[in-house]
Image (cartoon, rainbow, N blue to C red):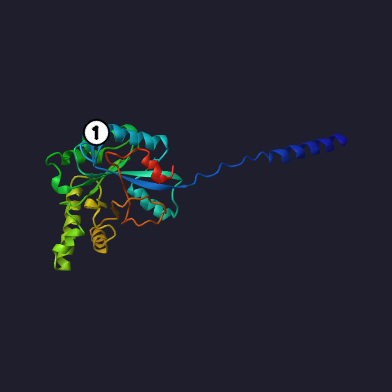
Amino acid sequence: MKINVIYIVLIISILSTTGCFRYEEPEPEPEGKIIVLMYHRISPGEALNLYERSVSSFQQDLEYLRNNKINIIDFNDLLAIEESGKMPAGNSAILTFDDGDNSWFNIVQPLLKQYRIKATFFLWVYMIGKNSFISWQDVELMSNYTFDGGVKPFTFGSHSYSHPYLYGSMAGFSDPDEYNSFLDYEFRESKRIIEEHVPGSVEIFALPFGDGAGDENIIAAAERNGYKFIRTSIHGTINTYDSDLFLIPAIPMLDNTESNEIGYYLGL
């Protein structure tokens, strides 16, 4: 009987010391921010102007994203985040490209495939297939490319039909109906043409020159023509799950931008 009492005391002592073998759960990773990166042309050599970025600098950006464990998401993920009512753990980035330079096909696409990164490309529709712009055939090939698992990583959105100043053009119209017709044409015609060459529907718009961010007429035109997102050129990050999807900020990645500026905006 005495041995049994000693045994019970020993067991109680062990359990109290180990917490009944329960281990503390790791702290959940805190909610992060979302940064939208805005590129234009990627140059095979040195950048020739401020809005170009050399391929070496672009690759450094991709390495920075990977080394700092920044998740790569797309615009559809923003809808899922809004519906979830919570920002994702860790920081995230969306890669975007404006206008339609043929470097997208020759330089950007191979690197994004190598790093398995998604991106959204905004087309200046009138210029596609002209001068140094990407061809519609290349747009079709990129938009139908599929990663293992069935994910199509390359999405195409509209950068308007003729790349005008959308808000700045308002002064040229004496009749509000004429101005709205102008907006409808830029949104609708670009969307219609792009959808002839890509799978799915075009729902994302990038403002030419960043002009008209937050303007109610432009937002209304986007909505009635089937868009769910407007990417602006306002500098900043997405910090809350309920951010305005028609006023999405972006950080331009220019010739003189250091890769670690991505971390600066994310608070790294």
Quarter of the image with the C terminus in it: top left
Rendered view: 167 above or below 237: below
Residue 243 placement: quadrant: bottom left
Percent coordinates x, y for residue 207 in the rendering:
24, 53
Is residue 253 shown above or below 239?
above
Question: What residue is rendered at 41% in x and 55% in y?
Answer: 83
- Residue 199 lies in what quarter of the image? top left
Mark 1 = which residue?
A: 107
Q: Residue at x 19, y 55 (%)?
A: 165
In the picture provided, is 204 more to the left or to the right than 237?
Answer: left
- Tell me how many marks there are: 1
What residue do we see at 31% from left, 33% from top?
59
Q: Badge 1: few (under 14), some or many (20 or more) residues near its Cα, within 10 Å?
A: some
Q: Residue 77, how many percent across, how many down?
A: 36, 48
Of 20 and 101, nearer the camera is 101
Seen as rendered, the residue at the extreme left is 130
Residue 227, given in percent of the width and then of the height, sits at: 26, 55
Q: Residue at x 80, y 35 (%)?
A: 7
Three-letter code for the amino acid on which mark 1 is drawn:
Ile
Mark 1 element type: helix
Percent coordinates x, y for residue 17 in the rendering:
72, 38
Occupied quadrant, residue 141: top left
- Identify which residue, 227 or 150, lies in the foreground: 227
- Quadrant in which the N terminus is drawn: top right
